[in-house]
Amino acid sequence: MTLQPVRGTKDHLFEEAQHFQWIKDVCAHQATLGGFRRIETPIFEFTEVFHRLGESSDIVTKETYTFEDRGGESITLRPEGTAPVVRAVISNGLTQKLPLKFFYAAPMFRYERPQKGRYRQFHQFGVEFMGADQPLVDVEVMALGYGTLKALGIEKKVTLKVNTLGDKHSRSSFTKALVDYLTPLKDQLSEDSKTRLAKNPLRILDSKSPQDQEILKGAPTLAQHLTPEAKSYFDQVVEGLDALEIPYEIDTKLVRGLDYYCHTAFEFVTEDLGSQGAVIAGGRYDGLCEDLGGPALPSVGWAMGIERAQLLSQLPEQEPQDCYVVPVEDGDFASAQRLVMELRREGLHAQMFYKGALKKQLKKIDQQGAAWALIYGETEREEGGVMARHLPSGKQEFVSLKDLPHVLRKGELQ
Ligand code: HAM
């Protein structure tokens, strides 16, 4: 048997790894422009951090990697980043220093059926705006999502779908009406929806079963049950999006997989990734901090699936900058290495191969897609320079060691 990565995980190599890093850098840059600061939390937490999020969410009940550690503690690999960030805010006593704006780029773990765009270890870039309950904050957070997709060059491939889940009162009145409507029809519902009817009826709205969707056509809607405050909140969110000219669609069927949301829920979805259409997803989660034992902390945020953003985007072409110092004879390797170190001290990308005839080295360097081959043998050393071959243009010229950093930085010969 050859060793394979665990199902649903993958290695990121070469250009793919670079592409992945580029996405993280672009996202971090956008978040930093908005005053968000990086937060790193552990990849595992006490299980209760997640299990308090809702016993009816599949992510929490069916998909977590949970185990007992050697000390008998129940530990869960984080399936998402929001609860850990809220936990960190409580643990570090930050709930008085508001607002708090955090971002993270980190691996998450969910035991899901792997397919394109869905993995068991995947990575999220997320932002959390905490300690603010104004509708315009939701707008800012969605605008940051839109701006980030734009910076990645993929905003045209996605649509922003927005919905309101109302406040507590709206939701309990709606949930009751939905249960009253569905209970007499229970036998006709899919198995999943039957279970959800008892545990989390709102998730039935999200059902993919055509038969459930047919039944739902006659169901009451949340819009009919919104309190005036919740309706006004959502109106302000939508007006805010209009004012910033962010394109969106209202999708009254949008309910999120995690249970902690209220008011605004949103997803940036694409048609290009089959069934795994959500690239960014998030919403407002005013009650989560209290659920975790902290004070009230109205908050809103989102997370992007970095692998999904990668499937949609392209790494911009980058000018090669690597240069290789090429020793000519066996006796030239040590002095070539000294030159490599000098170039690195100048802040230049420099490396060398430690064996091989000149021709062989040049061939390998060419295959690496490098920018420069700097031939450095006895003659060059005596003349105080290198024979610099600029590989993209094929030009070659003697360059003195004094001028070399300048020429390499400029990226071309005279
Ligand atoms: P989520 O919708 O569960 O929300 O995940 C956010 C994003 O992570 C999804 O839209 C998708 O792009 C990506 N994602 C989820 N599962 C997978 C998977 N198995 N493989 C690849 N990508 C995946 C959350 O996690 C919330 N914490 C978002 C949030 C932040 N809400 C408020 N703040």
Image (cartoon, rainbow, N blue to C red):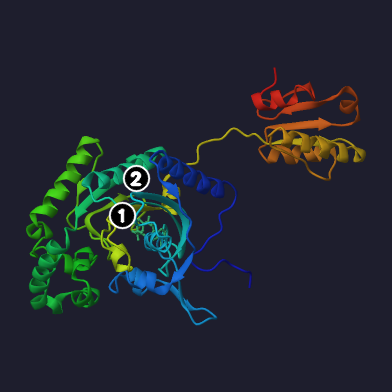
Report x, y in % for residue 362.
77, 36
Quick check: 85 above or below 397?
A: below
State the residue in front, 360 or 344: 344
| Mark 1: C-beta under 8 Å from nearest atom of ligand 1 | yes
Answer few, some or many: residues within 10 Å of disc 1's Cα (few below 14, many 20 plus, some between 14 and 19). many
Lower sequence index among marks 1 and 2: 2
Q: Amino acid at mark 2?
A: Gly
Classify residue 107 as left or right of residue 374.
Answer: left
Q: Quadrant of the C terminus?
A: top right
- Tell me the distance, in whole angstroms, between the alpha carbons under discs 1 and 2: 10 Å
Quick check: 74 above or below 371?
A: below
Q: Quadrant of residue 140?
A: top left
Answer whether labels 1 and 2 touch (C-beta < 8 Å): yes
Residue 152 visible in the shown view: no
Residue 157, labelled with which disc?
none
Answer few, some or many: residues within 10 Å of disc 2's Cα (few below 14, many 20 plus, some between 14 and 19). many
Report x, y in % for residue 165.
19, 58
Q: Amino acid at mark 1?
A: Gly
Asked which secondary structure carries label 2, the reply is: helix
Label 1 belongs to which residue? Answer: 282
Q: Residue at x 80, y 34 (%)?
A: 339
- Determine the residue located farthest toward the top in the rendered image: 414
Label 2 belongs to which residue? Answer: 145
Classify residue 406 as left or right of residue 113.
Answer: right
Q: Residue at x 75, y 21 (%)?
A: 403
- Determine the residue located farthest toward the bottom in the rendered image: 72
Q: Quadrant of residue 146?
A: top left
Q: How many marks?
A: 2
